[in-house]
Image (tube, rainbow, N blue to C red):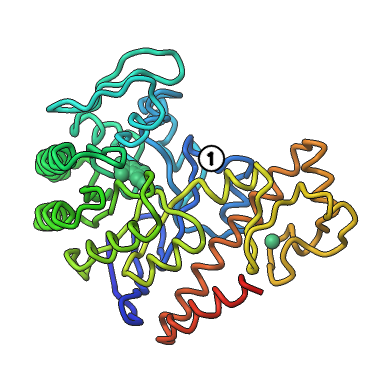
Amino acid sequence: MEFTLDATSNKARACTIKTAHSTIQTPVFMPVGTLGTIKALDMQDVIDTLGAEIILANTYHTYLRPGDKTIAKMGKLHGFSTYPKSFLTDSGGFQAFSLSDISKPKEDGIEFRSHIDGSKHFFTPKKVIDIQHNLGSDIMMILDDLVALPATKERIKLSIERTTEWAKDSIEYFRTKQKEGIGVDQNIFAIIQGGIDKEMRTKSATELCALDYDGFAIGGLSVGELNNEMYDTVEHTTQYMPEDKPRYLMGVGTPEDLIENIERGVDMFDCVMPTRNARNGTLFTSFGKLNIKGAKFKEDPSPIDAECECPTCKRYSRAYINHLFRSREITYFRLATLHNLYYYLNLMKQAREAILQDRYTEFKKEFYAKRSK
Ligand code: PRF
Ligand code: ZN
């Protein structure tokens, strides 16, 4: 992977990341395509309308169904899904932790039961790399041990010690496989843990950033802590991360979270929020959130967001979208998902423009000013 830091505006960064499948300009929001599809969309929407250069898929889900070996046979994620650009795959640790009925972190891996059929599985650092080799993702994530917050200092300490041990095994295995010709075009990121404890974050970041990874993620946030605790932890952690590699904040967040964390030096984000909220009737706009199910939209001829250039806003009224939502029409899901993702991706484009012009602080002020009107 090729990385260039194009510009900075205080701590905010505009970078370019070149993988074997696409050129990604940051800050970037990666739409979540857990099962190798962005729910409600066709890949044509994702490529042509959204122009997404990278999307996310999940090891946990695709391993359980249809199985990573099946995906490998069908041309890996790119061939199977027909999405020709970059895939990032999460390692499964977080999904085992959040979705499985039983998930037991152990010394050498994570034991969990499938949320589909209750079958027992064991993920180790090597196993999730093998699976991600089969998936063929451009960026794979290591197995990490994360803890729900609040947690005791002891549990957080154990989590970062395990994560570092696993990270050492992971990078050695990954680079050895590359020498054997496996995963040559793939990249691997480590995941910094440590809760909201600054001392733990420093330790985790320092230990992991000394290893030969292609990029680094900040994990273990947006799991129950306050917004300001997240922002402070990110601000603290980014100072220990290399300037010449991508920085990815996992599973975050709201538009405000993105704006705040870009300011603190984060390059990459993913979250189910725009896609999941679309399906629940919550739409993101330049003036804040809007719940399209409201009776007040029943005869509203205006678009969801007059400033939005997405196909939904260019063509349809709030009245029509409100009607589709209330009638549970399938088309609603596509139109709402398109709008929300378009909003997120466009926000990242604007943030990048502002960084390139070294006016990120002003951009952030304008972003908030519009929402308070
Ligand atoms: N680890 C992994 N995936 C994740 C997280 C993490 O800490 C988070 C935390 N917000 C989201 N997805 N592997
Ligand atoms: Zn729109």
Tell which quarter ligand 2 is in.
Answer: bottom right
Q: Amino acid at mark 1?
A: Thr
Q: Position of residue 363 (x, y in %)?
A: 50, 80
Task: Judge the density around disc 1: few (<14), some (14-19), many (≥20) Cα neighbours within 10 Å.
Answer: many
Q: Position of residue 262 (x, y in %)?
A: 38, 68
Q: Residue at x 28, y 44 (%)?
A: 141
Residue 202 quadrant: bottom left
Q: Residue at x 65, y 53 (%)?
A: 338
Looking at the image, is 122 positioned above or below residue 223?
A: above
Question: SS class of the residue under badge 1?
Answer: loop
Q: Residue at x 55, y 80 (%)?
A: 366
Looking at the image, is 156 positioned above or below residue 308?
A: above
Q: Is residue 343 visible?
A: yes
Q: Is residue 143 visible?
A: no
Q: Position of residue 76 (x, y in %)?
A: 40, 36
Mark 1, residue position: 37
Q: Residue at x 51, y 71 (%)?
A: 349
Instruction: Describe residue 122's horizontal placement relative to residue 113 as left or right.
Output: left
